[in-house]
Image (cartoon, helix red, strand yellow):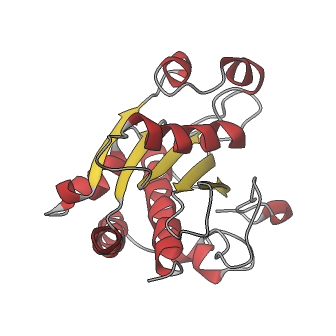
Amino acid sequence: MSRSGGDAARLCSSWSPDRPAFVGDPAMHVGDDGDVDAISNDALVSRCDAMVVRVLAWCQRHDCKVAAAESLTGGLLADAFVRIPGASTVFLGSAVTYDVAAKASILHVDADLLRREGAVYPEVARQMARSAAALYAQPDYGDRIIGLATTGVAGPGPDGPKPAGLVYIGVSLPALESSSAARSTWVGELRCSGSRARIRRVTVLRVLQNLSQFTANSQE
């Protein structure tokens, strides 16, 4: 990810000081391009596996579920979960809404917003993350579903004025503590580099890194 203009991971919604910054923030070394550029795709997958194992364990302890809404990753985020044995106790599914109209009809992302800004936009990622949690809701789960979202330009070329590698990821967390009244949703901007396949893989890694940080920093 590039640090151009200090925008490696721009926070696009309100931020609570007791939460970690998004991985990819210029203030955080773990989000630098250098931590992924030199490793193989197999190593990326291994990192993802390790993080999913931790997230699944945390969700099982807290009786939480995970659901996703994917665009550029096209099911890779879902695969990161289901490749781990026992994921079915936590992971509910992923809505792969690659088409812009599908984002509106299936996820209920604001159609006017999509027409005005396109699919690669921070508010689109925010709405996708919240909608993922809502889409897979069941009475037995209550409001204990974590919603994840990915939308961006995988390349190889730009999408109009938006360059290849521009990605927005969303994480929507339920209010687990009784003092918390509402769900919290965060969006991060990524500037990824490399091939189309590499951008998609790194996007999955960044989603999992941030989800892992959010869960690790929540109250046990």
Instruction: Give me the residue at 62% from left, 59% from top.
Output: 181
Q: Which residue is farthest right? A: 5
Q: Is residue 123 above or below residue 195?
A: above
Q: Residue furthest left?
A: 85
Instruction: Point out residue 100 in the picture as x, y percentages from the top left corner.
Output: 56, 21
- Asked if residue 118 lies left or right of residue 175, the reply is right
Q: Is residue 155 visible?
A: no
Please tell me which residue lies in front, 54 or 77: 54
Indicate the position of residue 186 as horizontal and vertical percent values: 65, 56
Seen at 66% across and 30% down, the residue is 159
Pick the quarter of the image with the C terminus: bottom left
Quadrant of the snapshot with the N terminus: bottom right
Quarter of the rendering containing residue 101: top right
Q: Looking at the picture, how far across and down is residue 202, in whole percent? A: 48, 59
Residue 209 pos. (x, y %): 48, 69
Q: Residue at x 49, y 59 (%)?
A: 207
Q: From the viewer's perspective, is residue 6 above or below residue 151?
A: below
Within the image, what quadrant is residue 86 found in?
bottom left
Question: Which image quadrant is residue 113 in?
Answer: top right
The answer to whether residue 145 shows anywhere in this view is yes
